[in-house]
Amino acid sequence: MHPHPSHEAIEIAEAILFPLAIPLAEPIRMSSETITHASTVLLKLTDQSGRVGWGETSAAPQMTGETVESLLDDLDHLLSQTKHVRWLSHKQIAPEQSRRARARPSARACQETALLDLISQHLGLPVWRLLTQGQAQPGALPVLRMVSGRTDEEEARDIRAHRDKGIFHWKIKVGLGEVKEDIRRVTYIMSVATDCLVSADANGAWSLAESLTFCKGVEGSGLAFVEQALAPNADLSDWTALRSQTTLPIGLDESVANRADLERFFKAQAMDGASLKLIKLGGIVEGVEALRFLNQSRLGANLACKVAETSLSAAATASIGFAGGGANWGLSLSNQYLCEDICAHPLAARNGVFHADQLGAVGIGIIPDEDRVRSLVSTSHSIRAYSRS
């Protein structure tokens, strides 16, 4: 294994924040909200040599408490406090962020992605290769899709149509109504998706009693796991009780934000796997460490973009998978739900999976079209620009 070549220190000459509002192809209903637009922020960093790096983060009031306005303010603070840093290594990013600013994970992840994009460009490497330390070519990541449709028949058609395109990982949103209806619907979907890996995501909608009713009601259906059955603030003892009283594997999302959380739930025997998102983790590097922990512990691993984000976040999230050893519970590319994306050729599954060679040879893997980005800027917010001076 050879160390990566060195590069000159990177100094940021200009930073621009683009607050975007992108319509979804169709609304996505969850137990706590219905989403019609992607509310996301893109960061463009230009260094002293004219190279450009991009990062993205998204509003998630129900998960992180972040709004577009709070993201812009957090990034404003983070950028102002780090504008004179000379960036030499990806290992420098998190310590500098922690030392200089009180920024939350979403803003840290956005800046880190843009800096990793620049650093890996200077080194002539893709971001995922920078973080694998010379390991072999990674395997493809299975792409996951949410079941779409207003009726049983529409959902069945959606599954069959995309299964013909190679999609075999699916997520069902549950917790919107009565538990008995969720049991009926999931059982029906499983009769259609017999050869697929299917999960049910409650987004924390249920009590322990409701969760047990659901799990026992779908045992034997073939459902792969239930995600975030209990509220994010549920006691660890409730999670332990749930897992001990059902044969259905238990996945976590909103309840875990970092590797320490994963280790705590794993030690308590309260989970079988987890969903990892950049907006929770604080960056790609932390995401790789969390994913490696899941894989080394033989737990289920799902990598997910927030619903919904652009191809930029999709590239960053996929990079975690390629550097961290794969995601057996699937890769959720949420740009597939957008009416339009920030690049001419949005990232997408190829025969149901996503390959490392679908990303660019250097950097984060895609280059946003700035004209497209500017056309998608929210009418409720303004572009913010910063210079080094």
Image (tube, rainbow, N blue to C red):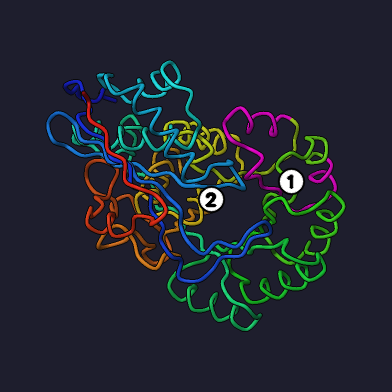
Magenta stretch, residue numbers: 241-267
- Amino acid type at circle 2 is Asn
Mark drawn on residue 328: 2
Mark drawn on residue 341: none
Q: Which residue is pictured at 59% across the width and 81% down the height? A: 154
Q: Is residue 148 left or right of residue 382?
A: right
Tag nearer the camera, 2 or 1 = 1
Q: Which residue is pictured at 59% across the width and 41% down the height? A: 65
Picture coordinates of residue 287, whole percent (x, y): 48, 36
Picture coordinates of residue 4, whole percent (x, y): 24, 25
Q: Which residue is mark 1?
A: 231
Alpha-carbon neighbours of circle 1 within 10 Å: few (<14), some, or many (≥20)? Answer: some
- The answer to which of 327 and 60 lies nearer the viewer is 60
Picture coordinates of residue 164, whole percent (x, y): 46, 76
Picture coordinates of residue 286, whole percent (x, y): 47, 31
- The answer to which of 381 and 103 lies nearer the viewer is 381
Q: Quadrant of residue 11?
A: top left
Q: Is residue 44 left or right of residue 281?
A: left
Real-space CA distance between mark 2 and mark 1, rounded to the nearest whole angstrom: 24 Å
Label 2 SS? loop
Label 1 SS? loop
Q: Earlier in the sequence, mark 2 or mark 1?
A: 1
Q: Quadrant of residue 197?
A: bottom right
Alpha-carbon neighbours of circle 2 within 10 Å: few (<14), some, or many (≥20)? Answer: some
Is 297 in the magenta?
A: no
Q: Quadrant of the C terminus?
A: top left
Q: Is residue 134 above or below residue 91?
A: below
Q: Is residue 102 above or below residue 217?
A: above
Q: Which residue is pictured at 38% across the width and 32% down the height? A: 76
**Number of numbered labels in the structure image:** 2
- Amino acid type at circle 1 is Ala
Is 259 in the magenta?
A: yes
